[in-house]
Image (cartoon, coloured by chain):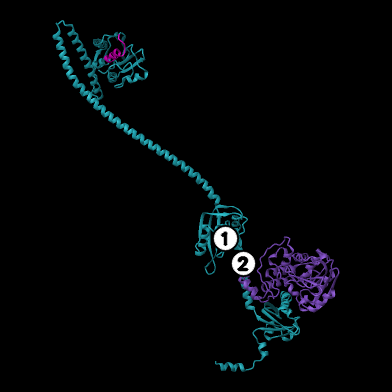
């Protein structure tokens, strides 16, 4: 497994028009499969395109599968990260549109996990013509509880997560040692990183977590004009069933499918069920 | 304890269940959905649950805080699925009583032959002490960060250029705004000094920096010239700085960077340069003045020298004058003796000749007598001068009748010359108290001059005029006269008017000088009036009535 660990350099701006080739490199775009119809898979917070590894093979025979990493995640170009641009989900939606434009994609089937569900909603509102169908795995328009709304978390829960992440994101010794010693850019650290899967730059992960968990896209749901599917796990702490129902209720043309699964990542823990549900929809 | 003993101990069968439950760490096993299927007693003790309460009833996630649950769902589970193991997660477990235990959490996936996840085996080690240290350390670090920020803030606000150069390559680690202003538009931060400001490489300042880094000795530069660019493309300018280079040391007292405090003083130095330029000009001017002064001094000295030589010349002159006067005096005296003898012989010869009627001899004797008289008068004149100059001239006051003296003197003059017509106006028998012989010689001098400087047959008018307190005598001729500029000098010693008219006229230029001295000693006045070509009038006056008796 390829692993990378790069110390974060903040405040790189990439507002300029970026040529196609560099978009493909910037977002580490990978195209697999032989089909005509394009399936675009967008990873959620905390991982990268490798999280799709248990289900993509099921589609490459019939579809052209496009995988990518958001800027700041996976093997994207970290130097393209801007703490200003990526301070809202709109920045990530732009990544999505950039990839579509770079590959001249139209009428794609979009599969978005977790926060990517809302990123997909935002992108499809902006450019509906790019999208044919949208599939959301564990979507949530808002994680925080609100008046007449159950997101699943109170503010203090999220603060404890951020604190938790600050001290624990990639394993205790790898996180705490640099935090205490103050040498996070010691290059050899990466080689011994304990839990290297989906390792994202800690600074980016920290901001991405805040953007994700503090976003509120409930008002955007009604604007979506593209047909969509919500895959809701029966036992998901992150996106409880009530949230899935809220999404289904507020999205025009949305179908809700319940997966008998525990957790927030059925495409990893229950790949077969997930594949089947997607196939049934498309 | 020997090997035998060890083997004996190891030969006792160990109960695996006992090892599991009494291990110094917690063990827990749960299904992919988190349902707990086994936990050891150590963990149960920590959590305060009985096996019955936990196993088959709770999920692992429910032991975690909400934050932990998110991490568990979003990181732990995907990681375990993909990697098969997770190590060293720092989790908080909620005990039955609601307290929190900090544990380090590691897990391995138990998979079936197809790779499907069957269960999760996890180990939990007590991390409470470490967590506490960790919190302390984090807090200490946070405080240090705050301090660092405060320090940075402080650095940023120091009213001088401040930068911190890190490591042997002197990388700009911190640049405050005033320092950056020294190089507006040049990128400094995070760059080695030689990359950011390459022009310093060949300057003394580079060696100074290296020295400070090497020795740790602080260097303070005062108004040091450092040619630098302001901007990346700008020209190298001569700039002056006051600055301090100070070594920064690490916790082992080894130099690991430099602190630079700098104030640009180019404007001040240049302004002072102008002042100094002015000062130099002033100095040059002063030097010129001094040179001029010196020249003046030299000139002055020359003048003094000239004066000294003049004085010397005057002294020499006076000495030679005295010698000459002495000589004249002596010569006159020596001449007078034979002349007196000659006069006596002539008088005896005249007496013997009386009765003989040889007209030639009588005439010759008369002429010889006249020549002797003239010579005697000349010698007396010289003697008068020497007496005058040596202060030996005695004025012998006697009362006498001036008219009579004038008459006598005219007669005496007529003895030697009969070429002129004398007209006399008397002054009523006025008497004066004076030296009769000397006043007589003055009158003779006037008369002989009138005769000498006027043509034969012209008039010589002698006037005596008595005023209220003085008597004035004048001798007027119709001769060549004198120029006004010569008139005053006529009374100077040896002065003779030089002209074609006077060249053939004999005389030593002493008569009027002696006369003026005589009149001066009588408290009288002597002067002349003249018109060139028309004639001259010479005057003298003597006081009357109050004359000393």
The dot on residue B194 is: 1
User: Disc 2 designates what residue?
Assistant: B145
Residue B488 numbered mark, or none: none
Q: Is residue B93 above or below residue B519?
A: below
Q: Position of residue B485 (x, y in %)?
A: 36, 20
Does residue B450 lie above or below B123 as drawn?
A: above
| Subunit of label 2 | B
Q: Quadrant of residue A89?
A: bottom right
Q: Depth-wise, is mark 2 or mark 1 nearer the camera?
A: 1
**Picture coordinates of residue B271 (x, y %)?**
54, 47
Q: Which chain is cyan?
A: B
Instruction: Give, as a single range, the part of the protein colored magenta.
Output: B443-456
Secondary-structure class at tag 2? helix
- What is the display colour for chain A? purple
Identify the subunit bearing mark 1: B
A165 above or below B170? Answer: below
């Amino acid at each position: 497994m390829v692993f990378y660990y790069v110390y974060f350099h903040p405040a790189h701006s990439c507002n300029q028009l970026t040529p196609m080739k560099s978009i493909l490199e910037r977002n580490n775009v990978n195209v697999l499969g032989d089909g005509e119809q394009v399936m675009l898979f967008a990873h959620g917070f905390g991982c990268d395109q490798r999280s799709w590894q248990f289900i993509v093979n099921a589609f490459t025979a019939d579809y052209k599968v496009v995988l990518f990493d958001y800027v700041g995640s996976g093997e994207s170009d970290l130097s393209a990260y801007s703490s200003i641009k990526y301070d809202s989900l709109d920045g990530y939606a732009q990544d999505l549109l950039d990839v579509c434009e770079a590959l001249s994609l139209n009428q794609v089937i979009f599969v978005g996990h977790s926060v990517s569900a809302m990123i997909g909603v935002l992108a499809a509102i902006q450019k509906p013509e790019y999208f044919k169908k949208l599939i959301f795995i564990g979507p949530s328009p808002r994680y925080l509880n609100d008046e007449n709304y159950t997101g699943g978390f109170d503010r203090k829960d999220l603060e404890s997560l951020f604190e938790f992440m600050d001290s624990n994101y990639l394993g205790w010794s790898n996180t705490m040692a640099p935090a205490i010693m103050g040498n996070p850019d010691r290059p050899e650290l990466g080689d011994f990183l304990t839990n290297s899967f989906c390792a994202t730059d800690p600074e980016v992960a920290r901001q991405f977590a805040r953007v994700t968990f503090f976003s509120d896209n409930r008002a955007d749901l009604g604007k979506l004009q593209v047909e969509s599917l919500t895959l809701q796990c029966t036992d998901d702490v992150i996106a409880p069933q009530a949230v899935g129902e809220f999404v289904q209720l507020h999205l025009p043309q949305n179908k809700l499918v319940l997966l008998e699964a525990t957790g927030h990542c059925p495409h990893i823990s229950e790949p077969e069920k997930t594949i089947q549900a997607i196939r049934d929809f498309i | 304890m020997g090997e035998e003993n060890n083997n004996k101990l190891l030969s006792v069968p160990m109960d695996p269940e006992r090892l599991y439950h009494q291990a110094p760490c917690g063990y827990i096993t749960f299904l992919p959905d988190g349902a707990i299927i086994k936990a050891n007693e150590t963990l149960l003790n920590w959590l305060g649950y009985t096996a019955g309460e936990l196993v088959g009833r709770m999920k692992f996630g429910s032991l975690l805080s909400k934050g932990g649950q998110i991490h568990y769902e979003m990181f732990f589970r995907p990681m375990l699925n993909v990697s098969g193991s997770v190590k060293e997660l720092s989790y908080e477990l909620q005990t039955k009583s609601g307290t929190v235990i900090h544990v380090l959490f590691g897990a391995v996936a138990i998979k079936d032959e197809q790779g499907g996840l069957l269960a999760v085996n996890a180990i939990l080690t007590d991390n409470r002490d470490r967590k506490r240290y960790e919190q302390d350390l984090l807090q200490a670090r946070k405080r240090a960060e705050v301090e660092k920020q405060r320090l940075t803030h402080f650095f940023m606000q120091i009213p001088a250029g401040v930068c911190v150069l890190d490591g042997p390559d002197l990388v700009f680690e911190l640049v405050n705004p005033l320092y950056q202003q020294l190089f507006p538009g040049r990128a400094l931060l995070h760059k080695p000094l030689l990359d950011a400001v390459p022009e310093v490489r060949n300057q003394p300042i580079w060696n100074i920096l290296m020295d400070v880094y090497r020795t740790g000795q602080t260097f303070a530069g005062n108004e040091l010239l450092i040619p630098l660019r302001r901007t990346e493309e700008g020209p190298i300018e001569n700039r002056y700085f006051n600055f301090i280079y100070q070594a920064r040391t690490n916790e082992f007292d080894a130099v690991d960077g430099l602190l630079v405090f700098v104030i640009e003083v180019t404007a001040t130095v240049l302004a002072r340069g102008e002042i100094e330029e002015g000062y130099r000009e002033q100095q040059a001017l002063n030097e010129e003045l001094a040179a001029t002064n010196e020249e003046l001094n030299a000139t002055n000295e020359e003048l003094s020298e000239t004066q000294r030589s003049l004085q010397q010349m005057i002294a020499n002159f006076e000495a030679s004058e005295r010698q000459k006067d002495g000589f004249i005096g002596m010569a006159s005296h020596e001449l007078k003796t034979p002349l007196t003898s000659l006069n006596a012989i002539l008088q005896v010869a005249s007496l013997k000749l009386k009765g003989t009627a040889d007209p030639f001899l009588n005439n010759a004797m008369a002429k010889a007598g006249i020549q002797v008289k003239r010579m005697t008068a000349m010698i007396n004149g010289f003697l008068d001068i020497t007496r005058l100059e040596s202060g030996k001239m005695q004025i012998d006051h006697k009362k006498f009748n001036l008219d009579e003296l004038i008459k006598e003197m005219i007669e005496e003059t007529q003895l030697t010359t009969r070429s002129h017509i004398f007209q006399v106006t008397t002054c009523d028998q006025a008497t004066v108290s004076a030296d009769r012989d000397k006043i007589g010689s003055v009158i003779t001098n006037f008369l002989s001059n009138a005769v000498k400087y006027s043509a034969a047959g012209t008039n010589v008018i002698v006037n005596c005029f008595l005023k209220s307190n003085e008597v004035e005598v004048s001798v007027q001729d119709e001769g060549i006269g004198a120029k006004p500029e010569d008139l005053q000098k006529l009374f100077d010693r040896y002065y003779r008017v030089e002209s074609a008219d006077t060249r053939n006229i004999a005389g030593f230029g002493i008569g009027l000088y002696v006369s003026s001295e005589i009149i001066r000693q009588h408290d009288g006045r002597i002067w002349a009036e003249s018109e060139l070509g028309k004639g001259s009038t010479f005057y003298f006056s003597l006081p009357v009535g109050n004359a000393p008796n």
